[in-house]
Amino acid sequence: MEKREQLFAELPEALVEEMLSRSEQVGAMLHDSLVEILNNKDKMRKQLEEGGLLRRDTDVGYPSIPTTCGVDGSYAVERLLATDFVACAAVAIEGLTPPSEKRYWEKPHHRVFIQSERHDPDTSTVIRGLMMEMEVELAVEAPHDIVFLDGSLTTPLIYMNQAINKVLQWQKEDISFHVSEELIKRFKDFLKFYKDILESSRTDKLWVGMPKYTARRELGKMLNWSSHYDDRAILTTILSPGEFTSPVPLEKPQQQWHLRLPDEDKELERLRNEVLSAIDRLYVIYYRPHNWTPVFRIEIASSIASSIATNNSRLAVLLQGVKYQSGTPGIMEPYPLYIADRMVKHLGRAIPAFRQTATRRMTELHQGDIGEIFFSMHGYRTESGR
């Protein structure tokens, strides 16, 4: 009760009472939606079985446990009086051992960027694109059998297109930013690495996207399920431990996938077109490895999906890796993604410490009134993501 009072301490009492009352109404509505799913559970399960969409991991074999790695990133922008303090980082974390990856992996297993920029409300859009470039680079360099990427495989394209649009606007306005220069410098390599991930042509390596949050409903639209919940929510109720769904094509956007280029270059155009072609051929499967985990949404390349039709070996490796790395109750995603996520989320909290370090160095170099420095480096709000 004391914690609840502390939680609402700064809010007007009448507002709290009204919000609590409305929360009860929302709870009743959500309960009705859940009961609808439970009442139709057997019917929806039968649809999966009759459509050949429901399978068990025991049917694809038991390969040796693969080595795994999780990649995640984060960014932060702290708005100061005189400037914006921007930073992003990406980390790659090995999965539970054994097994341990014996192949050479060049260090460091992280990428960082930190800089001060002039004020602009859309700096976060560009720093987020740079973060995606770092994540994709680490994912390709990791030598592991399975590389888990936090989020959808389409996310890098979406964020990068938004970032490039902003960079082109800055260029048109003749405004220079460190973060835009860094993003453009890495852009060609990003396209090459992203293409490798989306095509996944190597038979000894799997790149998969594992979004925690999704609104996509590939199976729901195919089988005419209720639109109140996405596929992952419904399948968590339907699937038993060890069951997964056959690959289905990723839901297409209402408009075609698009990615602007920072400049006219034939090689960039070729790489961009190959990326767009590959992203149009992604597939998704849902898998529930244990009774203490929800269903995982796993996005895979068409090369992996097509190999499943003739040979289950790559699928067996994937399922074995996911199952082994999600064996701890309470962790709702594969272990390396969980640890990577926890690490990078601390970036936003650490920004004030980085700012204080920069401020201290400024005071050491400044010959005038240091009060001017403290005012210019005063922080208002930190914006962070992922």
Image (cartoon, helix red, strand yellow):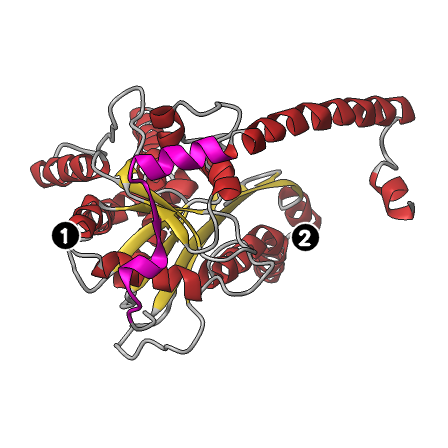
When asked about the image quadrant of residue 5, the answer is top right
Relative image position of residue 9 (x, y in whole percent): 88, 37
Density class for disc 1 (Cα within 10 Å; few <14, some 14-19, many ≥20) is few
C-alpha span from label 2 to label 1: 70 Å
> Which of the marked residues, 2 or 1, is nearer the chain's N terminus?
1
Q: Residue at x 43, y 76 (%)?
A: 97
Where are the magenta residues, as a range?
A: 42-63
Is 377 placed above or below 67 here?
above
Asked whether residue 169 is drawn in magenta, I would say: no
Identify which residue, 365 or 295, lies in the foreground. Answer: 295
Residue 345 left/right relative to 65: right
Q: Residue at x 65, y 25 (%)?
A: 32
Relative image position of residue 16 (x, y in whole percent): 84, 27
Relative image position of residue 163 (x, y in whole percent): 35, 34
Identify residue for label 2. 370
Query: Which numbered tag is attached to residue 310?
Result: 1
Relative image position of residue 236 (x, y in whole percent): 51, 43
